[in-house]
């Protein structure tokens, strides 16, 4: 079903924007990982190189996407502005970006409770 309403288009625009930011983050994380590998004082195994790449991408996603979407004031406000179907659409579209950041989110929330 194609949403033709203004709200539906706005939800689509939000999803496209987050996907575009994520695409930029993936490219930057790859470039930064290659830089790190080149300047590391020892050779990394393929497993270590993959782990650093995943960690860098997860950190960038957390910093630029997940932390904002996980902020209760923002998510509650957004939730109040969209229908149930649109909310499910947003969550489904962002699930791949949010996935892998649950441990970072838990650590962040714990740190916030201790400040």
Image: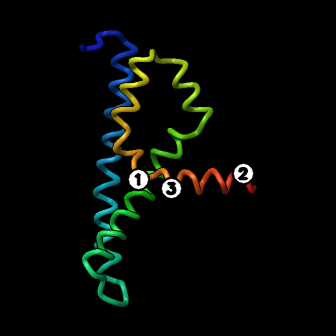
Residue 33 placement (x, y as % from top left): 32, 70
User: N-terminal of the two: label 3 or label 2?
Assistant: 3
Residue 55 placement (x, y as % from top left): 40, 64
Per the model, the C-alpha gap separating discs 3 and 1 is: 7 Å
Structural crowding at the residue carrying mark 2, measured as other residues with C-alpha within 10 Å and reported as few (<14), some (14–19) or many (≥20): few
Structural crowding at the residue carrying mark 1, measured as other residues with C-alpha within 10 Å and reported as few (<14), some (14–19) or many (≥20): some
Residue at the spot of label 2: 113
In this orientation, does residue 75 appear?
A: yes
Helix, strand or loop at label 3? It is: helix
User: N-terminal of the two: label 2 or label 1?
Assistant: 1
Helix, strand or loop at label 2? It is: helix
Circles 3, 1 touching at the beta carbon (< 8 Å): no
Q: Residue at x 60, y 54 (%)?
A: 108
Q: Residue at x 39, y 17 (%)?
A: 85
Judged left or right of residue 72, residue 102 is: left
Residue at the spot of label 3: 103
In this orientation, does residue 63 appear?
A: no
Q: Quadrant of residue 39?
A: bottom left
Q: Residue at x 39, y 20 (%)?
A: 86
Judged left or right of residue 61, residue 110 is: right
Judged left or right of residue 32, residue 66 is: right
In which quadrant of the rendered image does the C terminus lie? bottom right
Residue 88 placement (x, y as % from top left): 40, 25
In which quadrant of the rendered image does the N terminus lie? top left
Residue at the spot of label 1: 100
Per the model, the C-alpha gap separating discs 2 and 1 is: 22 Å
Position of 107 relative to 22 (above/below): below
Residue 57 placement (x, y as % from top left): 37, 59
Per the model, the C-alpha gap separating discs 3 and 2 is: 16 Å
């Amino acid at each position: 079903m194609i949403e033709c309403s203004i709200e539906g288009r706005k939800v689509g625009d939000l999803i496209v924007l987050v996907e575009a930011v994520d695409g930029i983050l993936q490219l930057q994380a790859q470039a930064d990982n290659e830089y790190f590998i080149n300047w590391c004082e020892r050779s990394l195994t393929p497993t270590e190189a993959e782990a650093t790449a995943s960690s860098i991408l997860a950190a960038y996603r957390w910093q630029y996407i997940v932390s904002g979407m996980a902020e209760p004031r923002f998510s509650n406000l957004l939730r109040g502005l969209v229908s149930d179907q649109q909310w499910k659409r947003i969550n489904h579209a962002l699930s791949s970006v949010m996935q892998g950041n649950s441990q970072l989110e838990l650590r962040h929330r714990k740190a916030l409770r201790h400040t």
